[in-house]
Amino acid sequence: MLNVENLDVWFGFPPDRVDAVKQVSFTVAQGESFGLVGESGSGKSTILRAIAGLIDSWSGRVDVAGQAVHGSHRDRAFYKTVQMVFQDPYASLHPRHSVDAVLHEALKLQGMDNIDRRINQLLDDVGLGRGFRFRYPHQLSGGQRQRVAIARALAGNPRLLLLDEPTSALDVSVQAEILNLLTDLRREHGLTYVMVSHDLAVVGHMCDRLAVMQHGQIVEVMEVDALRRGAGQQDYTRHLIRASAGYERA
Amino acid sequence: MTEPMLSVRNLHVSFPTRQGVFEAVRGVSFDLGRERLGVVGESGSGKSMTGRAILGLVRPPGQVRADRMDLGGQSILNLPERGMRKIRGSRISMVMQDPKFSLNPVMTIGDQIIEAYRLHAGGGKAAARKKALEMLKAVQIRDPERVMDAYPHEVSGGMGQRIMIAMMLAPDPEILIADEPTSALDVSVRTEVLNIMDRLVRDRGMGLIFISHDLNLVAQFCDRVLIMYAGRVVETLAAQDLHNARHPYTQGLLNSLPRLDAPVDRLPVLQRQENWRSDPLIDQGLETELPKGV
């Protein structure tokens, strides 16, 4: 579904050039859920943004559903296949567009017919109900906003969802609801996920395999079972797993 | 039992709104000794407002009422601004969530610490500079001379938070209120920052109020935990007993966390009950009594 080879992403020009992602390669199979974990600045979100076409300063090879992509230009077919959900549901929805307007626009851009029926369908899919259709973002809680953002991403029946910390701005009880929703949607629609998170427990819950990143490079790719056992091949992985487990009094 | 350092009874914080009076905090009571007291709750539970009310940081039209709010036997409830300023910083300090918004972006870090210190402790510039360097060393900043001359945008988030702690601790306060001090930090930096605060509590006998949404972290780091829901403390526990929590809200929060050691297909979702807002508390005594030996 997704194949990334020797991906480099940089920002700025020499001498101020920053190499945010260095020689990253990984493959995600159809129907798989793949996690990218690491601390801030490790380049995990940058990879998603490069794939989605939000950054043009990258090199390497990215294939999505067998099609190579280039630069920051993506055609309609790409956006039909790939959609992204962002971290902050307070920032990713237009404050003056109602839920109806947000979904209407997304459906129209995807060239869908029967928009009225589909909006109701999308709202049902993400567990919001039709009563939310004419509300504005400020009338919604954080979890409800993230549901709208997910509904918008689902508008074109995508096959690959790029999830950039989809629950880190939410309370833990709301996080559980959104993670359950994402689990159900993947099952019902046969979606493939690439999920970025700094929370190892969330990735452990959602993903089959994951890549641990540090300083723009993949330190190791591991199965989720190895993560649960705390069995990293690399020192950094074990350090990260231990530190995530919580606080041990020194 | 020793005298509590801080004693709060029946604290209320309310805000008039167009829809009527909104009560952000509704009758919170607790005592703080020389301990690490965790305050846990979701967003909107009133945990930050409790911290702000203690320091007199609730802005009008917000109102703070309490039967009692004593610091070392002296009432600090609704002190006039002049009196409050003598307490803020020198006796009770606060570390906020995000160092990006609490440091002055156009002043070097050294100047900010020196200013904060001299405001409370007085003294000459040279002595304050020495103290600032000492504090930066105390929070494990490797190259304090360089950091003194740096601006906040030139340091990382973890370093910024340690600098905030250094600044808050320079006047040697009795109580530190830390409002989500590690939420903006990476896990490895988080451990360092917690170690620093832990040492301060042990070595200086400081009282720490640790406000956080992270139940597990609080259980591991603190001695005692208050769990807040809708402006009230619904349960108080010794931190090591957190996993035996009796209140359904506490249990629900714990269960909704994904766990690496216990994989599940679907996470249990918290079912909120209307009576959590108003039911009598589980154990009235626990709420206020200091544990023995503190």
Image (cartoon, grey):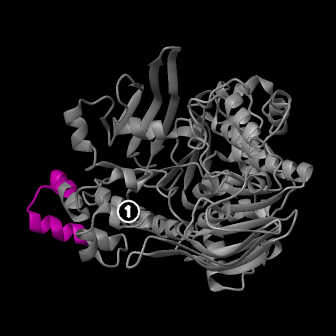
The question of residue B221 being in magenta is answered with: no
Residue A165 locus on image (x, y percent): 65, 56
**Image quarter hosting the N terminus of chain A:** bottom right
Whole-percent x, y for residue A81 in the image? 80, 55
Res B246 seen here? no
Q: Residue at x 85, y 48 (%)?
A: A185
Local secondary structure at mark 1: helix
Q: Quadrant of residue A199?
A: bottom right
Residue nearer the viewer, B189 or B245:
B189
Residue B219, given in percent of the width and then of the height, sits at: 61, 56
**In this picture, which residue range is highlighted in magenta?**
B116-133
Residue shown at 68% from the left, 26% from the top: B279
Question: Is there any visible trace of residue A122 in the rendered image?
Answer: yes
- Residue where numbered disc 1 is placed: B160
- As displayed, is residue B126 above or below residue A152? below
Q: Residues within 10 Å of mark 1 (few under 14, many from 20)?
A: many
Q: Does the stretch in magenta take in B132?
A: yes
Q: Amino acid at mark 1?
A: Gly
Subunit that carries the residue with mark 1: B
Residue A119 percent location from the top left of the image: 80, 32
Q: Main secondary structure of the magenta part?
A: helix
**Front residue of B13 and B59:** B59
In the rendered structure, the answer to whether residue B165 lies left or right of residue A129 reads left
Q: Quadrant of residue A164?
A: bottom right
Q: Is residue B283 above or below residue A84?
A: above
